[in-house]
Amino acid sequence: MPNPFTPIMQGMKITLGHLFKKPITLQYPEERPKVAERFRGLHGLKVSHNRAKCVACYLCPTVCPAKCITVEAGEDANHDKFAAVYEIDMLRCIFCGYCVEACPVDALKMTGEFELANYRREDFVFTKERLLEKK
Amino acid sequence: MVTLTIDDKQVTVEKNATIFDAAKVAGVNIPILCHDKKLKPFGACRMCLVEVEQMKGRLIPACTTPVTEGMIVRSTTESVEKARKLVLELLMLNHPLDCPVCDKGGDCELQNLAYDHKVNVNRLSDEKFHHEIDYNNPLIERDQNRCVLCGKCVRICDEIVSRGALTFMNRGIETKIGTEFDGPLNCEFCGSCISVCPVGALLARPFKFKARFWALQKKSSVCGYCGTGCSLTLGVKDNKVLTTVYDENQGFHNGQLCVRGRFGYQFINSDKRLKSPLIRKNGELVEAGWDEALELVAARLKSAGTAAAALATPRMTNEELLLLKQLMIKEVGSPNIDHSAGYGHAALTAGLAKSFGVAAAPSTILDIQKSDLLLVVKSDAYETHPVVGFEINMAVKNKGVKLHILSDKRGKLGKLPGATVLVHAPGTEVTLLNAMAKVLIDENLASGAVAITGYTELCAGLAGFAPEQVADQCGVNAEAIRQMARDYAAADKALIVFPTGLAYPVQDAQVAHAVANLAILAGKLGKEGSGLLVLQEKNNSQGAVDVGFVPATGGLDARAILDGCVSGSIKTLLIAGENPLVSYPNQTNVREALQNVEFLVVADLFLTETAKQADVVLPVCSYAEKEGTFTATDRRVQKVQPVISPVAQSRPEFKMYGDLIRILGGQAPATPADAFVEIPAYAVLSYASLSTEGAFVPASVSSQLVLPKCSVSVVETGKLALLVGAALYHCGTLSQFGEGPLSVCPEGYLEISRSDAARMKIVDNDEVAVSTASGTVRLKARVSPRMSEGIVFSPYHFAGNPINQIWSGAAVTSVTISK
């Protein structure tokens, strides 16, 4: 029969050992986590030459498994295509990142932004203005 | 027949087939960019290269190589694959590869081939093209940078449309598709070039950036404009019709459409559609509920009784017309129903009904290409029914069919190779046709018709119609008339084609008699590719006649109904879809009628000029929102299904008239299928088996020769002869709400001959005043080589320039023109 104190000692060893380690928990919101570089948080529309890089090719709404992206293309003064409407419904988004992968012009990224709580349902629909990356 | 082997599959095909055709039969897919089944083989893209055992050592283009007996073809060998890959790499060398912003993405043959052949890197590199993109017209965008020079646009514009607006320009690497003098595209804007373009070099601007191809639901329907009855595929997204989609396997026309069919769909989801029923209260039209509106309409119809009347548009389905007829005759008790101004259907109901014993023409559009000789009365056949015009183009150019045209003005058909055109004085077509009949009789070319009823009376009646006697009056050479009659009689299979409709009032029935006489005398009836084809104006003109939407016994016709409104004998008038204020002749009379009638109900898609006068306006559905059948001009019954749900509060007329019948205590058929069986003319068809392609109801002819009445219209001296007709870009007044046709032909115009224009110092786009005793209309002038001196022409569709202010329905109106 093994010593009945051995498991207790082993457990205490782990417990006491943690007293001298850096804590895993964060004192959120005072302390904030540092998210990984490839974390999939809120989407961001990249900007180039003072306009969104998005050309409204509709590949992201096509590939989106949650059908949460709404794009409407417009024609600008130079007859070029741009996204007149670009909306993501965060209540439906599953953060799979397929939209970023599908984008042929690298116009979309996923940021480290994860605090997406809101008071009203309509505030979960992120319009183009809210998604544009801030300089 | 020839038997050959393709990829180990044995196949037997026609002697004149190509390897590509044979592969299709064998089920072997050969990639190609420059082939369309309507066009002649061209061999431009070199994608269809195959190996042929008997021609070892080189690769053979499948689309231009005829099959030979015992040929052994391999389409998937290593060398073939290598060659195709190189072709694709070369094509993509200068291609901008801007698929994300190109509207063709997802429907692009180059994209598909690159994917199939895994061409994702290019071993070669070169500069991209820097051609300027043509945004000069509102319908067709041309981006030469994306072009792969397959030449399909050039060929369809030449071979089928016969316009020749596009051609290859320059040589070698500089080659591009150009327009005349490299200027803006100057054409009919039928969009055929867009439909066949394998890449995004030609795009439909009204649909540009609206949706990606893969997001569209493709739904089959029938075009709602003219009587040709073209099948079309509508691209639908989010309950909106966004575009028309080309399908080369659709209908007798192989997906070929005209400007109205391809670009005129926008009226379906127009912002101008009526949102809810309107009732006039205190002089204003205010929104109301359906129940209130229908109760009011039912009460007013019932109280009017025999003083009620209905005018319907032949754009309604057969079943809807049947219900409206039942409502008026059975429930309201009024025999006063009519359509197309009371004369738009005269060629059938008064003309052929007497000559042939049936109110339908015996031939079909399919006969055009099987004929030996076509006699087209009025060159307008192209303008009123462009897709029939394409069939005529193909018959003449590909099949060597002879073309004779009798017309008061020159037109596009007259430019076809070998066409004989007799331009006659306005309003003399019946005289001229009578003269031809006289020649047939005099020269013993009508010996087979001696026993037919009316022969002796006709011979006697035609006594004064020898070509020499009428030549001066018609303004045509007597020998030319004789020759045309002889040619017509000599042809084994000869088909007469003539358009009818609102624009050709008095003459239609007489022209119908006259052409029927020719066909009967020369014995051209009852043969394939021979006979008579009447082109009707609206998509269901034939159906309205077959359903019998014409005055019942003792009933008033359209003109009498309007007169009744003026005199007060008609109390309640129901106008279903017609816009008489714009489309009927004699606008003053129509306006007076609409103002005088006690109660006016208008059921329409839009608040038209007529609807603005109404006491109750009922919003109804377009062809894309309802179920039912349409009958094309050659008695082809086609079924449509709703492709979108009704816009706003609008209701299908079938439901609306059913409800009215039920309010008045009657029994109405529950579904269009139940109503269809009640149409005696279509007893031979089963509703369930009908499709958008349609099924023919043959017209059995019992011939009778009828002497047509000739009314001679003399133009007053010093004045010009005004002809009214249809413009190529429009059909009735509905196309006024389709943005596509309106963007290229936005307003009424006056075509005037060069010599008259020079005399009056008028140049293109000058605003001129066209006057008669009854009024003046201001129109933009178009100096046109197709008009003869002393004759001017104006289309009737436009509310902004209502030609019916000065046009009272006469074949020829004498007008004065001033700047």
Image: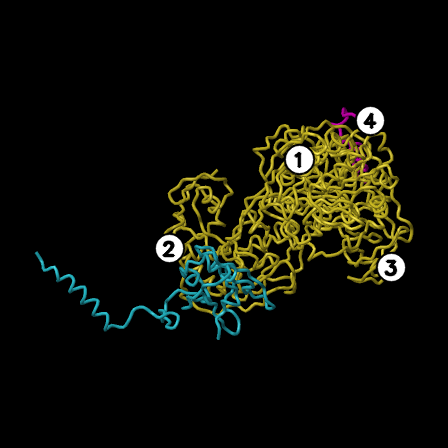
Chain colours: A cyan, B yellow
Could you say where residue B582 lies in the image, as x and y percent from the top left? 78, 49
Residue B456 marker: 4
Q: CA distance from mark 4 to mark 3?
A: 50 Å
Range of the magenta residues?
B432-456
User: Which element is circle 1 on?
Assistant: helix
Residue at (68, 50) in percent of width and height: B273
Same chain, marks 4 and 1? Answer: yes
Q: Nearer the viewer, mark 3 or mark 1?
A: 1
User: Is residue B197 at all visible to an observer of this figure?
Assistant: yes
Q: Residue furthest bottom?
A: A135
User: Which element is circle 2 on?
Assistant: helix
Q: CA distance from mark 4 to mark 2?
A: 76 Å
> Is residue B772 depicted above or below B433 in this figure?
below
N-terminal-most mark, 4 or 1: 1
- Looking at this view, is B406 or B553 the one in front? B553
Q: CA distance from mark 4 to mark 1?
A: 43 Å
Quarter of the image for the C terminus of chain B: give it.
bottom right
